[in-house]
Image (spheres, helix red, strand yellow):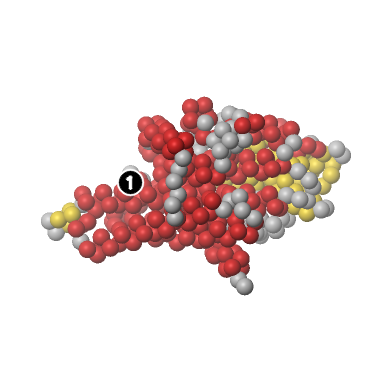
Amino acid sequence: MDFRLSDEQEMLRTGLNKFLATRYGLDRSRAAAKTGAGWQPDVWRAFADDLGILGAALPEHVGGSGGGSVEVMVIAESLGHALVVEPYVDTAVVAAGLLLRAGGQAATQVVERIAAGQAVVSLAAAEEQSGDRWLDVATTAHRDGTGWALSGAKMMVLGAPIATHLLITARTDNGVSLFLVDVATVERGLEMHVLRTVDDRRAADLLLDELRLPGDALLGEEGQAWPSLAQARDEGAAAVCAEAVGAMRRVVADTVDYAKQRHQFGQPIGSFQALQHRMVDMHMELEQSAAAVYLATLNLGADPATRARAVSAAKATIGRAARFVGQNAVQLHGGMGMTEELAIGHYFKRLTAVQYEYGTTDHHVTRYAQLTRR
């Protein structure tokens, strides 16, 4: 596959990589992830003010640069390479896409705030009984005067503890609907149980008990949210796949460097043919993953079936590769591979978590099989 970036996209990648190399050290980012709010708000603002990446793929009328899925891929891969914990994919890709497609004044204003680095938005779609099936929504919403009242529970809402807004799926009389919640305006009806994920990100389980919202909290038409949600999930899956490619590039490079430096029996372990073969296999998994991400990215604007098939192929490929590359990197580093002091252990945790975001590997393997069945 011949996939060449434009000059502008190459400049975007170069500028972002330079910023991350100088201002996003692993020690500082891990310390921020494990303490306090779990992220670096100053870095988030710099993403908007200094780099413009939060609006790089958004239309110009909301303060964006008018880019698209390729810009998202470039950004996500660089963020994955630096192991960035700030919620770029959840906010600037998934949530922003949902808000743009919904339209309306309230949604547009939040997208403008995303592009300006003033808003963090999390999607609350998964439930305990639904798992990968976002369409199986038990949370309910009913009319309450001129507004709405939501009741139910959502699980593992990534970024919720630091979010300024939430997007919550709920079942209304006509089907699945999507609601916008300004967290600062909530007085009661929303309980948040905060947790830290295995890869040092913030998430929360939500309990909704007659959470009252204004009438304009409904995004789009009542009961018609699923097509947009399905698209957002595929866009999120493609973006985290690109992020995983960036992480695997760092893991493979670090492993090769370590094999050159670590001596055993009087010579570098990288000189042993069996280990060379292992690292070649890691590199092959990485390149196959990159090709799958390119294919998914180029098909995000295709019809739903084609888009879903390409994304599931990428997610299934990434799931296999992330597991193989991560496990072998740890093994080749020996016991120190899982220590807090070494970068490999942190990347391994992130590559493990990626396998479960926006649909598990098994889910996408099954979906791909269904979509290709004749």
* Residue drawn at point x = 65 percent, y = 56 percent: 304
Considering the image in quadrants, where does the C terminus appear? bottom right
Choose top left, top right, bottom left or bottom right for residue 91.
top right
Residue 275: x and y in percent read 26, 61
Residue 362 image offset from top left, x and y in percent: 54, 64
Q: Which quarter of the picture shows residue 371?
A: bottom right
Foreground: 93 or 31?
Answer: 93
Left or right of residue 132, residue 136 in this image: right
Please indicate, yes or no, whether residue 295 appears anywhere in the rendered image: yes
Residue placed at 43% from the left, 35% from the top?
11
Tell whether 181 sits left or right of 309.
Answer: right
Say what amino acid the circle numbered 1 marks. Leu
Residue 89 seen by the camera: no
Badge 1 density bin: few <14, some 14–19, many ≥20, Cα 10 Å: some
Outermost residue to the bottom: 374
Question: Residue at coordinates 44% horizontally, 46% vertically from top-left?
Answer: 4
Give percent across and percent down for residue 156: 59, 50
Farthest-out residue, left: 266
Residue at the far top: name it: 49
Find residue 248 and report its horizontal and vertical position in percent: 39, 51
Q: Which residue position holds label 1? A: 342
Q: Is residue 249 above or below residue 147?
A: below
